[in-house]
Image: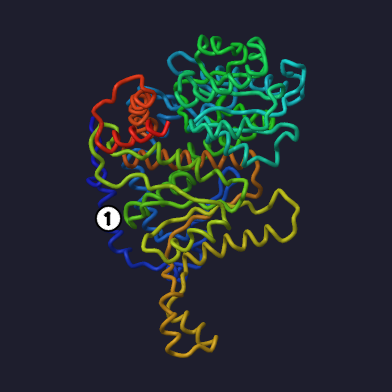
């Protein structure tokens, strides 16, 4: 059955009428008119606090957005996901990343598979292995303990574990150094191998099929590097796999006992909770890895049970939809005011844009509205001295998600107070701006002439009225990080349902990779040039001439 186009729904049309009324709203006035606005437009769940009051909307807006979510079947699709129904309709798969962080006694069966039992069997293997490496019981081929771990993957097999390991730096094992290689560019692997000792290095090859082109090129390079210093029988002590292809890993030289599987209902960008999180468990220990899962599960339970109007992922998604659809915002900036979250914007780029960067609905019909905005960002306060100029005074309206911990994990004096002051002040500045009359008054106080004031005033005026959310946690811990990641996962899911997208396939990743194989063969001289366009032919020719 074909879904009703989004713009034809009753709730969307009501929102469009409301948006025309709200077009000239000023947030300064909205705050002045409602002293309880902050209390009304903030929510706590799973160790996180969300303030969404600095958005250009009111209570009626939220009511209409909730109506839209209900009319689009968000709750029904959410329940179908948690029940293991095959909501990934283009690949006929269930979507069960939430099952990866569910407790052992959860009840869920898919195609006769006892999902919680299978998940916790793999978790038990992860615990045994990571305990052995972290304790020093796992020894390399010359009897030395492991000191360096290199994760070789790409996409979600790299972005997730790398982001989490960096974010949980304070919890890391003092004698283990984590390295991540994902780029097929040899400079990435060259830099990683530069100072490693093959006697004390462990490689994790993360590829479900053990055929991912970029990952296997890097894996084979690491294998050759290792075999330049050791015999083949030593491979089993220094290479493990996160995969399901037993024959391929045996051929590579990896002991099947050291293969950690996951399932086809685990999408790459949702996989850090699975065996793909093996580097995390090695870095911080299985106990803290379990806390990460528990934090995500707490957000799952909230998302699954809270009504739309009191549901943090729903609200974050609906506010984002309002900004995208009715304010014309083409991108969203992620601004974590925590240096350890420096890879979180990149992680969200894949999560959001690979999920909802789609132009057709689940039925294959063209979408009739804009879909996913571009996601980008850097940690504060660095961003303030880079792109915040554009956010404050540029011609595009770009919402910002500020993310901060109320307490630091360090004991350096004054730093955290200054950090939070910047975070909160920026959110206020984006909301309030600075009128030309306020600028003139300041310049008059500085003693400038009337002519100089009029010359400078336009340059120092800030339009304000720019939307933002602020997400706070007490500390950045494994549990709060788990909840934060799950919050954005569910936000992405909700928006995908509203747009009627399949948020769980990624066919757009494939086209360039297929063409790359053909071009690579031509660059190597293995095949004759095919009928490319003149630009591609010219680029290939220049590359071959440079060899």
Residue name at image x 54 percent, y 87 percent: 445
Q: For numbered disc 1, what is the local secondary structure? A: helix
Taking the image as shown, residue 318 lies to the left or right of residue 260, namely left
Q: Is residue 163 above or below residue 116?
A: below
**Residue denoted by label 1:** 16
Q: Is residue 519 left or right of residue 418?
A: left
Task: Please state which of residues 179 and 356 is positioned toward the viewer in this rendering.
Answer: 179
Give coordinates of residue 333: x percent, y percent: 46, 52
Q: Position of residue 410 (x, y in %)?
A: 73, 50
Q: Quadrant of the C terminus?
A: top left
Residue 507, given in percent of the width and then of the height, sits at: 34, 30
22 in relation to 123, above or below: below
In which quadrant will I find the N terminus? top left
Q: Residue 301 in the image: x percent, y percent?
A: 53, 36
Q: Is residue 270 visible?
A: no
Residue 275: which quarter of the image?
Answer: top right
- In this view of the protein, can residue 186 be seen by the observer? yes
Local packing at callout 1 (Cα closer than 10 Å; few below 14, some 14-19, many 20+) is some
Between 181 and 360, the one lying in front of the other is 181
Above or below, comparing residue 541 to residue 495 in the picture: above
Number of numbered callouts drawn: 1
Colour scheme: rainbow
Q: Nearer the viewer, residue 461 or 466?
A: 461
Quarter residue 124 falls in: top right
């Amino acid at each position: 059955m074909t879904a009703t186009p989004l713009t034809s729904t009753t709730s969307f049309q009501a929102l469009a009428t409301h948006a025309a009324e709200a077009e000239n709203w000023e947030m300064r006035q909205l705050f002045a008119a409602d002293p309880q606005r902050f209390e009304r437009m903030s929510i706590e769940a799973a160790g996180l606090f969300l303030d969404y009051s600095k958005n250009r909307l009111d209570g009626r807006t939220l009511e209409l957005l909730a109506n839209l979510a209900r009319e689009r079947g968000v709750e029904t699709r959410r329940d179908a996901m948690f029940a293991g129904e095959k909501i990934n309709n283009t690949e006929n798969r269930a979507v069960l990343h939430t099952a990866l962080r569910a407790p052992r006694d959860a009840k869920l069966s898919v195609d006769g598979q006892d999902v919680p039992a299978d998940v916790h069997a793999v978790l038990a293997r992860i615990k045994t292995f990571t305990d052995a490496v972290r304790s020093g019981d796992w020894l390399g081929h010359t009897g030395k303990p492991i000191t360096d771990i290199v994760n070789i993957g790409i996409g979600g097999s790299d972005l997730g574990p790398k982001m989490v390991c960096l974010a949980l730096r304070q919890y890391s094992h003092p004698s283990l150094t984590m390295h991540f290689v994902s780029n097929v560019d040899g400079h990435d692997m060259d830099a990683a191998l530069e100072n490693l000792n093959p006697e004390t290095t462990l490689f994790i090859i993360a590829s479900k099929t053990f055929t991912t082109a970029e990952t296997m090129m890097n894996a084979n390079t690491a294998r050759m590097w290792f075999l330049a210093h050791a015999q083949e029988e030593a491979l089993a002590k220094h290479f493990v796999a996160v995969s399901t292809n037993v024959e391929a890993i045996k051929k590579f030289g990896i002991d099947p006992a050291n293969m950690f599987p996951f399932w086809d209902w685990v999408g790459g960008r949702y996989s850090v909770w699975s065996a793909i999180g093996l580097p995390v468990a090695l870095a911080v220990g299985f106990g803290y890895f379990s806390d990460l899962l528990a934090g995500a599960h707490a957000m799952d339970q909230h998302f699954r049970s809270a009504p739309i109007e009191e549901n943090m992922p729903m609200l974050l998604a609906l506010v984002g939809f309002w900004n995208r659809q009715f304010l014309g915002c083409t991108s969203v900036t992620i601004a974590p005011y925590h240096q350890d979250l420096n890879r979180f914007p990149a992680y969200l780029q894949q999560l959001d844009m690979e999920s909802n960067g789609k132009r057709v609905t689940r039925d294959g019909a063209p979408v009739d509205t804009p879909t996913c905005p571009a996601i980008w960002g850097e940690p504060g306060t660095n961003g303030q001295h880079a792109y915040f100029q554009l956010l404050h005074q540029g011609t595009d309206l770009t919402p910002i998600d500020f993310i901060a911990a109320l307490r630091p994990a360090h004991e350096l004096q004054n730093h955290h107070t200054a950090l939070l002051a910047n975070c909160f002040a920026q959110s206020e500045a984006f909301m309030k701006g600075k009128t030309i009359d306020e600028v003139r008054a300041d310049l008059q106080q500085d003693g400038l002439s009337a002519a100089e004031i009029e010359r400078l005033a336009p340059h120092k005026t800030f339009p304000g009225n720019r939307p933002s959310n602020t997400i706070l946690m007490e500390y950045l811990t494994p549990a709060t990080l788990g909840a934060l990641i799950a919050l954005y996962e569910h936000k992405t899911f909700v928006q995908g349902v509203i747009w009627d997208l399949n948020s769980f396939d990624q066919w757009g990743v494939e086209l360039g990779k297929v063409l790359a194989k053909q071009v690579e063969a031509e660059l190597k001289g293995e095949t004759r040039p095919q009928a490319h366009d003149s630009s591609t032919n010219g680029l290939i020719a220049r590359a071959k001439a440079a060899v």
